[in-house]
Image: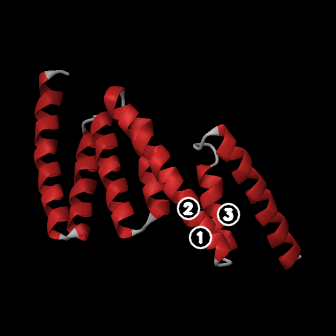
Amino acid sequence: MDEITFVIAEGLKGLNNAAVDLVMKGDLDEAERVFESIENTAKMFQYNDGVGTARISLANLSIMKGEIIQALTHIEVAVENCSGANKEDACAMQKKVSMMALQVGMEKEKKGELKGALELFERILPIINEKRAAAVAKEIESIKAYLKKSTG
């Protein structure tokens, strides 16, 4: 890491700490704005790991807010931008968020919210392990067939 990148990273760490304090105080909306500011600053300096780290934080915040689809979006961007140990962390979190999304999708399906379940299942299909993917793929086909039959 060159000197300029180091200075930028240190500044972003300070902002990150401030955002974490906001989360601890329950001000999730303001924390979200700070994390977005961190991401925008990191983008401006082409500091991809900074973008990825900000998106991991935004994914966590989305989970806290119960916004699983938004969490999936954030963690996908994090995986694309992180490298090294940060990439490993982002990938591990992506698997956890995918499992949360699977659970939420199954709950939606039980409630009859088939389009919502389908959206979640399709989003996580490329991420989950092979055994789960086979089961989810069958469920996707079943939902699509049902929706086609009921609207056709």
The residue under the point 35% across, 26% down is: 84
Q: Camera-side residue: 27 or 64?
A: 64
Q: Which residue is mark 1?
A: 107
Which amino acid lies under the numbered mark 2 shown in the image of this protein? Gln
Relative to 91, residue 97 above or below: below
Crowd around label 3: few <14 · some 14–19 · many ≥20 (10 Å): many
Rendering coords of residue 92 (x, y %): 43, 40
Q: Work out whether mark 2 precedes mark 3 in sequence or the reverse, and give the earlier one.
A: 2
Rendering coords of residue 126 (x, y %): 62, 43
Rendering coords of residue 72 (x, y %): 48, 54
**Which labelled disc corresponds to residue 103?**
2
Mark 2 near mark 1, Cβ–Cβ under 8 Å? Answer: yes
The residue mark sitting in front, 2 or 3, is 2
Relative to 40, residue 27 above or below: below
Distance from label 2 to label 1 (Cα)?
6 Å
Q: Assign a secondary structure to mark 1.
A: helix
The residue mark sitting in front, 3 or 1, is 1
Which amino acid lies under the numbered mark 3 shown in the image of this protein? Leu
The answer to which quarter of the image holds residue 27 is bottom left
Q: Assign a secondary structure to mark 3.
A: helix
Q: Is residue 150 left or right of residue 20?
A: right
**Which labelled disc corresponds to residue 118?**
3
Q: Is residue 83 left or right of residue 134?
A: left
Distance from label 3 to label 1 (Cα)?
12 Å
